[in-house]
Image: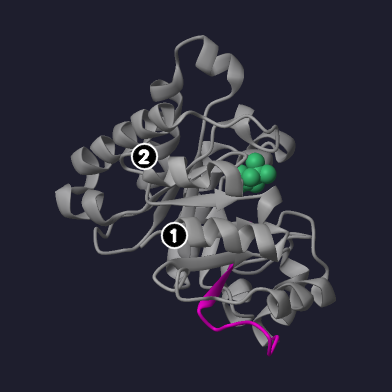
Amino acid sequence: MAVIAGNWKMHMAPEEACTFFGAFEIDEMMANNEILIFPPAISLLAAYKCEDRDPRVQLGIQNVHWEDRGAFTGEISAVMAASVGASYALVGHSERRQLFGETDEQVALKVAAALRHGLIPVICVGETLEEREAGRVNEVILSQLDLALTSIPDPEARFLIAYEPVWAIGTGKTATPMDAAGAHGTLRNRLEQAIGATTAARTEILYGGSVQPSNATEILAAQDVDGVLIGGASLNPQSFGEITRAAG
Ligand code: PEP
């Protein structure tokens, strides 16, 4: 059993989202996995209502604001996302951090907002190439994680972590299974210290960064990798299906 999550980014208008679900069928080999899709916010309701969507495919929002309502032009709150079918919220994706200047403090506020409205946060962490080359992988991902964890006071609250090295996102470069296992082990140890062994053992840590049908099996087999977060390859129902099947 693994978590297989697709981040559609700014792709898939409402009608295209429903067409995707018409072409994505869950067969026996995929059925043990938890399958999530993060459509763009404008397509969430269409995805939720689409009759062709197998209800086992759960939905999430790619970003939320930390307030519930107010004068925040262009933003969407967790309570709004929950009302149109989201069960999960991606928080702190590297594109949000890099392109939109999202800070660790804002990520923590967003985690709190998601939990407040019953959305399961998927907290994204990851280092840039420069940080990796400077030997700072653990320092960077742990400081990102630590701040996000300040918003999780209740050890019973479910949340997921996605380790997504920035240099591997959309570049065709993937971390080796050993690199992924190393980072995931570091994150799990920190969870154990911060929230306790039970939460650490049960929290799924996903790997993201150029996951494709051709490399999914070896990534998913790596120690401490509980699933994958897929960008590009999740836009195609066939490749998303193949990756989901690879998880068994
Ligand atoms: C992502 O957007 O989270 C991602 C991992 O993208 P890609 O699979 O395209 O690298």
Q: Which residues are magenta?
A: 50-67
Image position, residue 175 (x, y; %): 51, 29
> Who's the residue at 53% across and 38% down the image?
164
The N terminus, quarter of image: bottom left
- Specify the label residue 222 is tagged with: 2
Q: Which mark is residue 3?
A: 1
Secondary structure that dominates the magenta span:
loop
Q: Contact (CB < 8 A) between labels 2 and 1?
A: no
| Quadrant of ligand 1 in image | top right
Tally of numbered tags: 2
Q: Is residue 60 magenta?
A: yes
Circle 2 crowding by C-alpha within 10 Å: few under 14, some 14–19, many from 20: some
Above or below, comparing residue 98 to residue 39 in the picture? above
In the picture, which quadrant includes the C terminus? bottom left
Instruction: Pick out the residue farthest to the bottom.
Output: 51
* Front: mark 2 or 1: 2
Which element type, helix, strand or loop, lies under badge 1? strand
Q: Is residue 47 magenta?
A: no
Q: Nearer the viewer, residue 83 or 237?
A: 237
Q: Could you tell whether 128 is left or right of 113 in the image?
A: right
Which three-letter amino acid code belongs to the residue tagged 2? Ala
Q: Position of residue 135 (x, y in %)?
A: 45, 12
Image spot of residue 92 (x, y percent) = 56, 45
